[in-house]
Every structure is written in structure tokens, then in C-alpha cells.
Image (cartoon, rainbow, N blue to C red):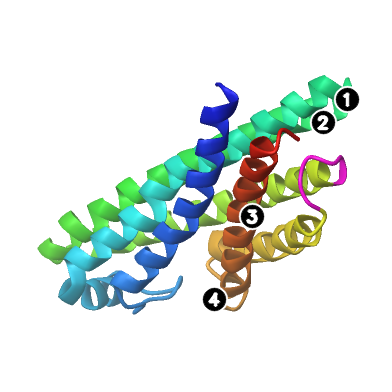
Amino acid sequence: MTTRTLRRTALAGGLAFTATWIAGLLVAPAGTDVTSSGAEVVAAIRPHTGATALQYALTELVPAVVLVLTVGAVAAYAARLGADRADDRLVTTARHLRRTAVAAGSISALQGVLGLALTLVAVPRGAEDAAGLLFETVNRADGVKMFVLAAMALLGLRIGRLGALPAWLTPVAALLAVSVAASGVGYLLLVTELATAAYVSLPLLLVWVTGAGVAVARRLGTGR
């Protein structure tokens, strides 16, 4: 990937990640929590099936691709910087950072597909058992994804400390790792109280991904 392409990918991806999430959260109301039954899921989604399907696309499918591209660009920049400095720690950390982004993106894409099956197939048919199973699977998968994102945040913290990202992103990464791990427990085990930590971890995720993407684009633009 050329420097110009890497810069554009980091910048556009970072901005798009937050934009798609905000759009996704605005298109449909939140009428369920992680413990909702199949009947409750059907009742909540049925009046808004189209909007909820779009929400899954904008919060799972599109971000899956954008996350991989953006964090992949950040990792590529960090790896280049590490190679220039002969810093094997930075090169290795960048490699692991890219892998966690791919893993999180893959889980998110799966959630998106399951979410579309829920909203466009199970709910319109009134299949409460299937809706309940799909909804639970999406939530538990979210828990797994959040643990992967926690690992990604810790790796992002490390490359920040090694000089590949601005210092202000280091505490953001630290707070993200803690909060997203807590919400991950809530989603994996279907514990509502812990799942609400997502109200903290999601904004931090948006700040870190967008901040890292924009920061890398600026550094590449100035030849740093």
C-alpha cells in the first residue's frame, strides 16, 4: 500500500467508523435488552423491521469492514515506523493489532448477518423461538467481540507508548480496554447491569478508532 493510499484509508476509515455508528444508532429505537425473550424481541422489532435491519447493517456489517481497514492502516503505519527505527517491539505489536482488528471485524460481520436474519426472516414470520435464539446469539457474539476489542485496545495502548500514536490516545485506549471488557462479560453472560458498560465503551471505541485513523493520516501527510 502506498503512503498516499494508506493516508486516505486511515482518514476516511476513521471518520466513517464513527459516522456509520451514529447513523445506525439513530435509525431505530432501542426496545430490548440482553435478557429479552423471543416474544419481547418480536414485539419490539416488528413495528420497525426495516429500520432495525438497517441498524444492523450500519452498526455491524459496515463497521466490520471499516474497522479492519482503519486499524489495518494504523497497524501498517506503526509497522513501517518500527521498521525504520529497527524496533521489533513496535513491528510485532502492529502485527498483532491488525490481527485483532480482523478478528473483531469478522465477528461483527457475522453479527450483522444474524441480525438481518432476525429482522427480515424470524420477526416478520412471528417465529419467537428463532428470534430469541438469533437475538441471544448476536448478544453472546458481541461479548466475544468485546474481549477481542479489549485486546485491540491494549495493543493500541502499547503502540501509543512506543510512539506510533499521540499521547492523548493512550488513556483513551486504557479506559476502552477496561470498559469494553466489562461490557463483554455482560453480553457474553447476558447480565444487563454489566452490559450497560457499553454506554461507556462504545464512545471510547469511536474516539480511539477515529482518533487513531486521523492521527496516522496527519502524520503521513507531514512525512512523520
Question: CA gap, disc 3 to disc 1?
Answer: 23 Å
Question: Residue type at mark 4?
Answer: Thr
Question: CA gap, disc 4 to disc 3?
Answer: 29 Å
Question: CA gap, disc 2 to disc 3?
Answer: 19 Å
Looking at the picture, does residue 65 appear above or below residue 76?
A: below
Give the mark nearest the N terminus, 4 or 3.
4
- Determine if the magenta segment contains residue 151: no
Q: Are marks 1 and 2 in contact (CB under 8 Å)?
A: yes
Q: Nearer the viewer, mark 4 or mark 2?
A: 2
Looking at the picture, does residue 39 appear above or below residue 52?
A: below
Question: Residue type at mark 2?
Answer: Leu
Q: Are marks 4 and 1 in contact (CB under 8 Å)?
A: no
**Which residue corresponds to mark 1?**
87
Expressed as whole percent of the image width and height from the top left, the position of residue 62 reads: 38, 48
**Which residue corresponds to mark 4?**
192
Give the mark nearest the N terminus, 4 or 1.
1
In-front residue for pair 1/104: 1
Q: Which residue lies furthest to the left in this view?
A: 125
Expressed as whole percent of the image width and height from the top left, the position of residue 151 reads: 71, 46
Tag 2's secondary structure?
A: helix
Looking at the picture, does residue 24 appear above or below residue 151?
A: below
Give the mark nearest the N terminus, 2 or 3.
2
Q: How crowded is mark 1: few (under 14 residues within 10 Å), some or many (20 or more)?
A: some
**Which residue corresponds to mark 2?**
90
Q: How crowded is mark 3: few (under 14 residues within 10 Å), some or many (20 or more)?
A: many
Question: Residue type at mark 1?
Answer: Asp
Tag 4's secondary structure?
A: helix
**Which residue corresponds to mark 3?**
211
Expressed as whole percent of the image width and height from the top left, the position of residue 35 reads: 44, 73
Q: Are marks 4 and 3 in contact (CB under 8 Å)?
A: no
